[in-house]
Image: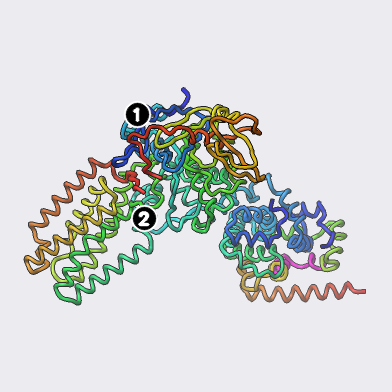
Amino acid sequence: MTSWHVDEMALRRWIGRSDSLADSASVEQHLLWCDQCRERVNAAVTGRPAPGVVDLGDMWSQIRDAVELPRSSVFERLLQRAGLPAHDAKLVAVASAFRGKWLAGVTGVLTFVALAAALGDSRGVWLFLAVAPLVPCIAVAFSYDPKVDPALEPELVTPYPALRLVLLRTVAILGMALPAVALFGLFVPGRAPYTWLLPAVGCVAAVLALSTWTSSLRAAVAVSAVWLVVVWSLVAQAGSPDVVLHARFQIGYLVLAVTSTVIFLVRGRHVREFRPRRR
Amino acid sequence: MTPSISLRGVGRRFGAAWALADVNLDLAPGVTGLLGPNGAGKTTLLRLLATALSPTRGQVCVLGLDPAVPAERTGIRRRLGYLPQEIGFPRGFSAFAFVDYIAVLKEWTQPAVRHAEVRRVLDLVDLGGISTKRIRAMSGGQRRRLALAQALLGSPPVLILDEPTAGVDPEQRAALRNVLAELARTSIVVLSTHQTEDVAALCERVIVLDCGRVRYNGQVTELVGRAAGRVWLADAPDVAASASWRTGTGRYRNVAEHARAGVEHVEPSLEDAYLLLRGGTRPDSGDVREVLS
Amino acid sequence: MHGSRSDAALLAAIGERDLAAMRALYDRHAAWLSVRLTRRCNDCDAVADAVQDTFVAVWRKPQGFRGDGDVAAWLWGIAIRRLVSRLRSHREVMARFEMMDATLVPAAEDQVLLSVEYGDIGQALARLSPEMRAVIQAVVLDGLTAKEAARLLDMPVGSVKTRLSRAKAHLRAALAEGLP
């Protein structure tokens, strides 16, 4: 490396923008390969914030934020648009139900089932009938189960109310899942799509209520099993899938939804409790 | 009023077996170590202190608040940092994102303040330089330090740590000890560990648990003092010793309740004292059984 | 300490998501980049944005540096292009032209300095019009293409090319004059 370095006066004139083109060109070319003179520029500019001069410290904070801060997902921004405060939106969007893989899986299942219903015979409809209300139910269960939500233990002892978290996630998931199921339901011959709503809501409420006693995943499995048995026996008896959505049963689903919700709210503090497994 | 934790007659049962029985403790600011074999109930005790579990019997009082009352439990959790024995991390998170997430759960709602605090705790555990690294790309020791970082958020008055230095290399362990010592000036720090050197270096008080009961609760120096004159070196393992092992120099270190005369005595370490304690008469089991590891 | 690490080593560390290495690179280069950019455009905010964009781009793709030449030159290439893409109004450029005018006549001691690096060219350059000097600086010294220079200086591409060839002709003539 050459031992020539920029003269102190020339450097100051360059920084102060009071030199000629040739001078500045000379300094600038030199700075491209001389670390020592770059350091001198640094020393001259740092600690002298003035209007018209960039603030190096402030710029670094911006860069660090751009690089370090986790980016908000689509769902987070959607939730914020819907009125949820930023920190709540962050907590809700973290739920696995909003993750790509889960969404892809669910869409796949629903597509398959809807196709089966649209193309096939009453058995296809029966399948859709069985599966559709379970989708939001399982999504909700997954959104706060420890197997899927691995940071459970430190999360448990944080002051954020668990009930609020579960409710927010449930409402968000329902807001997403119910229209989706209804959309797929359009392809199914027979009853109008909105008749799925009550069974779906009933199942979700049942899962929430049961999760105050046991893990949400087990609750979802139990509710799914019961629902499948109910559907199967009703259809076997009446011969047509439509019977499950009949008016008298709708009342039953409504009662289930309401009582489950009440139980859930009353026993709210037991939801997401730490239940250590025996090893 | 100095912050304190007290337990009176606390017991915790899982099914038919008692993991903890008749525990009476008082904890004050400073570092208290928790020693004991696997299955002694250390993790259960720590979970109780951290309000993750409730006792089957007895009273717990943390900072003057009762964890059995929901409103007071939330109050305790606002002043608590907890590092569990095993921790899982959400998928696809970076170190910064994880601590930020926990910070939100700890009610840090203002983003600018929260981010500054996240950076502070990451720097404390020396992970500031790799805050953007994906957790799945981090080593076991780095993950442990990350888990510790979330417990340090807000410099809580109560810090419960279950094996904080597991898998952490010696250099980092020394750095972590400094962080904990600094915090312990005003906070109550309880840590469980298998490394007696950690306890000896860091703790003023130590609690030894065995089969769910407290076998010793007092000053570290006093426990070490109990082993004075009861530790000696020999060229071969001594049958009369309750514990005997080969050291790096090729000689054998022996520990026994009743030392023989005319042997080469050495200064006792905490490990010796601990082994001596464990090697003594076992407590009457009764309904206490090893349940959890 | 990062003082001993070369720029290339810092870039490698940045590839491993080392934020401390990123800070070190920033500490080394942000100051001169900012000053040099401010000499092309008076708008402080645009310069700050350009520098920030540059470092974020480096973080995202440190392997963009192919190992040829200095890291500093690579950084400048990114920075000036970011600035060009951010420039909107004519105002910043006009202010720069005024700046140029003030340096028409170099001081006596400057001429001694000039001869060390550029010799007679320094004098020849000083006699060019501000627009021609700007074009020389953008195309020859900053390494921009005619199109990028046109955007930076807010003039049509044709003008850039014309002024460049005229400036070169002037310089050639001035140098030829100077030869003994």
Secondary structure predominantly adopted by residues drawn in magenta: helix
Q: Secondary structure at mark 2?
A: loop
Q: Are marks 2 and 1 in contact (CB under 8 Å)?
A: no
Q: Secondary structure at mark 1?
A: strand
Q: Nearer the viewer, residue C147 or A39?
A: A39
Q: Taking the image as drawn, is residue A188 in sight?
A: yes
Q: Nearer the viewer, residue B221 or B78?
A: B221
Judge from the rendering whether residue B260 lies leftward or rightward of residue A136; answer left or right: right
The amino acid pointed to by label 2 is Val
Label 2: few (<14), some (14–19) or many (≥20) C-alpha neighbours in 10 Å: some
Position of the C terminus of chain B by quadrant: top left
Q: Relative to B22, say whether C26 is above or below.
A: below
Q: Position of residue B251 (x, y in %)?
A: 65, 43
Label 1 sits on residue: B59
Q: Relative to A273, say whether C113 is above or below.
A: below
Query: Range of the magenta residues?
Result: C123-135
Q: Position of residue A232 (x, y in %)?
A: 14, 64
Q: Which mark is residue A148?
A: 2
Q: Is residue C129 magenta?
A: yes
Label 1: few (<14), some (14–19) or many (≥20) C-alpha neighbours in 10 Å: some
The amino acid pointed to by label 1 is Gln
Q: Which mark is residue A211?
A: none
Pick out the residue farthest to the right.
C180
Q: Chain of mark 2?
A: A
Q: Is residue B25 magenta?
A: no
Q: Relative to B54, say whether C10 is above or below.
A: below
Q: Position of residue C45 (x, y in %)?
A: 59, 54
Q: Nearer the viewer, residue A69 or B159?
A: B159
Q: Position of residue B2 (x, y in %)?
A: 48, 24
Judge from the rendering whether residue A96 lies leftward or rightward of residue C156; answer left or right: left
Instruction: Please tell me if label 2 and label 1 are on a single chain.
Output: no
Q: Give the Cα separation between the discs numbered 2 and 1.
A: 34 Å
